[in-house]
Amino acid sequence: MERLIAEASPRLSGRVRAWSGGLAEVEVALVILVASWSGPAISRFRALVGHLAGAFGEASPPLLVVDVDHVDPALLDALGRRSHGWGEIFWVKDGAVVDWLGKASAAEAEALILRSTAALLSSS
């Protein structure tokens, strides 16, 4: 997980970090659940970083990476979803989930990532 974050962080101006906190502490961020054993989750993470860097650059919101193998069940309860190894993404504003992405095609995921991130940034 550390290697994935280290590779991604420069692309998003250091705004990528491992995280295991509570939603109440999040003002504006994307939260992604990553399972190091899941090819789809790792692919989703890399695609997410590419879409954020390409479309939003330094204006991208923070990306909080949750290792599903070491997550507090209370965080999953707060997110309202479990990880199914797809690299689930949550858009969080003022401690509340405002949108989420589970299993989806690459095209569907890209469209939602761009639309939901733009909406999150415009509401901040």
Image (tube, rainbow, N blue to C red):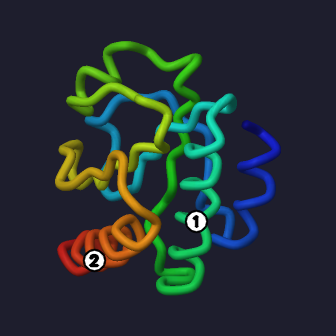
Image-quadrant location for residue 93: bottom left
Q: Quadrant of the N terminus?
A: top right
Q: Residues within 10 Å of mark 1 (few under 14, many from 20)?
A: some
Looking at the image, is mark 2 or mark 1 earlier in the sequence?
A: 1
Image-quadrant location for residue 47: bottom right
Q: Is residue 101 above or below residue 36?
A: below
Q: Which residue occupies 51% across, 55% down? A: 63
Residue identified by numbered label 2: 115
Q: Is residue 40 above or below residue 13?
A: above
**Name of the residue lying farthest toward the top:** 73
Query: In the drawing, does residue 24 fall left or right of residue 84?
Result: left
Residue identified by numbered label 1: 47
Element marked by disc 1: helix
**Name of the residue lying farthest toward the front:** 105
* Marks 2 and 1, how far apart at CA: 15 Å
Element marked by disc 2: helix
Amino acid carrying label 1: it is Ala
Residue 116: x and y in percent read: 27, 69
Residue 4: x and y in percent read: 75, 48
Q: Which residue occupies 52% across, 34% down? A: 66
